Amino acid sequence: MLAWLLVGLMCYLPANLLPMLRTRTLGHETDSTILGGVVELAHHGAWDIALVVFVASVVIPISKFVVILYLVASIRTRTRLSVHARIHLYEVVEFIGRWSMIDVFVVAILTALVQLGFLASINPGTAAVFFALSVAFTMLSAQALDPRLIWDTAEPETPPHA
C-alpha cells in the first residue's frame, strides 16, 4: 500500500508542475498549471470556481496522502485517535477516491467543447495524465489498506472484576 502511495505522490508532483491545459486563442498559445489556473480564475473574479478547483486539485489530494500515511502509521504505532475515528477517515478517503477524477473530466469536457479551429481551442496538457495516474495510484493505495488492521489496534476490553 505504501508503494502505491509513493508512486501516486511521485505522479502528483509533475501534475502540479507541468501544464494541465494548453489554450489557444487567435493563434496565441498559453499553458496553465493547476495553481496557475486557480490564480487566473481568481484574478478574473471567479473566486468560487477558483476555490473549487483549489480544493479539488490541491487540498483533497494532499489530504488523501496525509490521511493514508497517518492510517498506516496508526496501525504500526499507538495513536490517540479512536478506532472508530480512524475507520471513518478510511471510509472518507475511499469515498473521495471516486470523485477525485473530476479534474480530469473537466479537462476532457473543455477539450471536447472548445474546438473552434484558429479562433480558440483547449487541449489537455501532460499534467492531466500525471494527475489521473496520481488519483488512480492513491485509490489503489487506499484499497490495499485492509481496514481490519485498524480494528486490530483496538485496545482489548478488560472484563469486569467480580
Image (cartoon, helix red, strand yellow):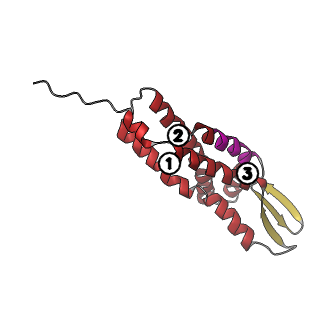
Give the number of the mark in front: 3 or 1: 1
Mark toward the start of the polypeptide (2 vs 3): 3
64 horizontally vs 8: left or right: left
Above or below — where is 100 with respect to 68?
below
Q: Which residue is drawn at the image coordinates 70% and 49% (left, top)? A: 35
Q: Residue furthest left?
A: 162
Which residue matches tag 3? 36
Q: Which residue is drawn at the image coordinates 13% and 24% (left, top)? A: 161
Span highlighted in magenta in the image? 6-17
Instruction: Pick the residue in front: 34 or 130.
Output: 130
Which corner quadrant of the image does residue 42 belong to?
bottom right
Give the percent coordinates (x, y) of residue 66: 55, 38
Helix, strand or loop for the magenta stretch, by majority: helix
Which residue matches tag 2? 68
Give the percent coordinates (x, y) of residue 145: 50, 42
Q: Which residue is drawn at the image coordinates 53% and 40% (left, top)? A: 68
Give the percent coordinates (x, y) of residue 153: 38, 32
53 horizontally vs 112: left or right: left
Q: Quarter of the image containing the N terminus? A: top right
Instruction: Pick the residue in front: 73 or 38.
Output: 73
User: Label 3's element?
Assistant: helix
Instruction: Pick the residue in front: 102 or 151.
Output: 151
Mark toward the start of the polypeptide (3 vs 1): 3
Labelled pair 2, 1 in contact (Cβ < 8 Å): yes
